[in-house]
């Protein structure tokens, strides 16, 4: 999530504290009949909002750690899949079985359909009518059949293990290539993938809770502050120093009311 996005939430919390400190200077004069904008209610809102920011930060760090661990664990799969193919090719496995393994390796590595290389043109043959041309937009060279999600990689790796397990002559001496070792690695990768997915769900839940606290229609921080400012204006007048000071404490709507539901 962009830094500016997260900074907006933190700024709102900081300004809520300033707003509450200003209300305290008004003393008993600030006495609204709306229970959601009393000094005590807004103080509780600050505690809740500040806690929601801390919660998102903590869960975000947990998610980043989980995804980093997953990426590091999955990275060797490309090389391992090629090594397993070589180990299978060294056996008496049928040609069709080897072809099936080749197909799985391509899917796991994302080699299903590679982009065609651009033709090489001699430098002297390229015309230059414009000495300051506008650069072309970047070209998307992504592979159309990459299936590069971690869930897909797990599926392909699982199928590789099942295929190797079905070949009687596949009995490598290398522990890393043996079925037991591959199954242990699959279990580890599955656990890391589940942990990353769970941490992402927790992050989404924490952000939803924060957004409701800050931006929900009627009950959110911004709407409550708006009503509090209106009450101060009713007490002192629109041109009063009290209202001008309160209104100068700005809050930013980072999330729309429609999305904060």
Image (spheres, helix red, strand yellow):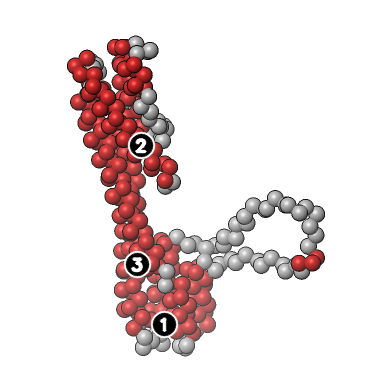
Q: Position of residue 136 (x, y in %)?
A: 67, 53
Residue at left offset 46%, top offset 88%: 91
- Vertical position of residue 26 compared to residue 62: above or below: above
- Vertical position of residue 188 compared to residue 38: above or below: below
The answer for how far apart the CA atoms under marks 2 and 3 are is 39 Å
Viewer-nearest of labels 2 and 3?
2
Q: Is residue 73 left or right of residue 48?
A: right
**Disc on the earlier residue, 2 or 3:** 2
Residue at left offset 39%, top offset 70%: 158
Viewer-nearest of labels 1 and 3?
3
Q: Is residue 224 left or right of residue 170?
A: left
Q: Nearer the viewer, residue 43 or 149?
A: 43
Quarter in which the C terminus is drawn: top left
Q: Position of residue 141 (x, y in %)?
A: 60, 60
- Label 1 sits on a secondary structure element that is loop
Residue at image mark 2: 11
Q: Which image quadrant for residue 29? A: top left
Checking the image for residue 124, the label placed there is: none
The answer for how far apart the CA atoms under marks 2 and 1 are is 62 Å
Residue at image mark 1: 167
Checking the image for residue 189, the label placed there is: 3
Q: Are marks 1 and 3 in contact (CB under 8 Å)?
A: no
Q: Position of residue 56 (x, y in %)?
A: 31, 45
Q: Nearer the viewer, residue 131 or 213?
A: 131
Viewer-nearest of labels 2 and 1?
2
Residue lying furthest front in this view? 241
Q: Position of residue 42 (x, y in %)?
A: 24, 27
**Disc on the earlier residue, 2 or 1:** 2
* Mark 3 surroundings: few (<14), some (14-19) or many (≥20) residues within 10 A: many
- Label 2 sits on a secondary structure element that is helix
* Mark 2 surroundings: few (<14), some (14-19) or many (≥20) residues within 10 A: some
């Amino acid at each position: 999530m962009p830094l500016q996005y997260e900074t907006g939430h933190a700024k709102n919390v900081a300004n809520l504290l300033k707003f509450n400190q200003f209300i305290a200077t008004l003393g008993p004069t600030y006495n609204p009949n709306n229970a959601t904008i009393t000094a005590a209610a807004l103080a509780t809102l600050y505690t809740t909002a500040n806690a929601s920011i801390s919660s998102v930060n903590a869960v975000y760090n947990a998610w980043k750690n989980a995804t980093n661990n997953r990426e590091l664990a999955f990275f060797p799969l490309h090389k391992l899949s090629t090594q397993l193919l070589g180990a299978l090719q060294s056996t008496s496995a049928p040609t069709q079985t080897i072809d099936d393994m080749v197909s799985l390796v391509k899917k796991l590595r994302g080699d299903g359909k590679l982009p065609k290389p651009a033709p090489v043109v001699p430098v002297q043959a390229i015309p230059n009518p414009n000495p300051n041309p506008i650069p072309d937009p970047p070209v998307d060279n992504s592979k159309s059949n990459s299936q590069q999600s971690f869930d897909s990689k797990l599926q392909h790796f699982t199928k590789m293990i099942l295929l190797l397990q079905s070949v009687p002559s596949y009995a490598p001496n290398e522990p890393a290539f043996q079925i037991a070792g591959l199954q242990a690695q699959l279990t580890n990768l599955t656990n890391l993938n589940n942990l990353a997915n769970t941490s992402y769900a927790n992050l989404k839940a924490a952000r939803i809770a924060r957004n409701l606290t800050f931006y929900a229609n009627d009950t959110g921080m911004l709407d409550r502050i708006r009503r509090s400012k209106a009450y101060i204006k009713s007490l002192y007048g629109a041109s009063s120093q009290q209202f001008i000071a309160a209104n100068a404490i700005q809050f930013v709507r980072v999330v729309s009311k429609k999305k904060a539901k």
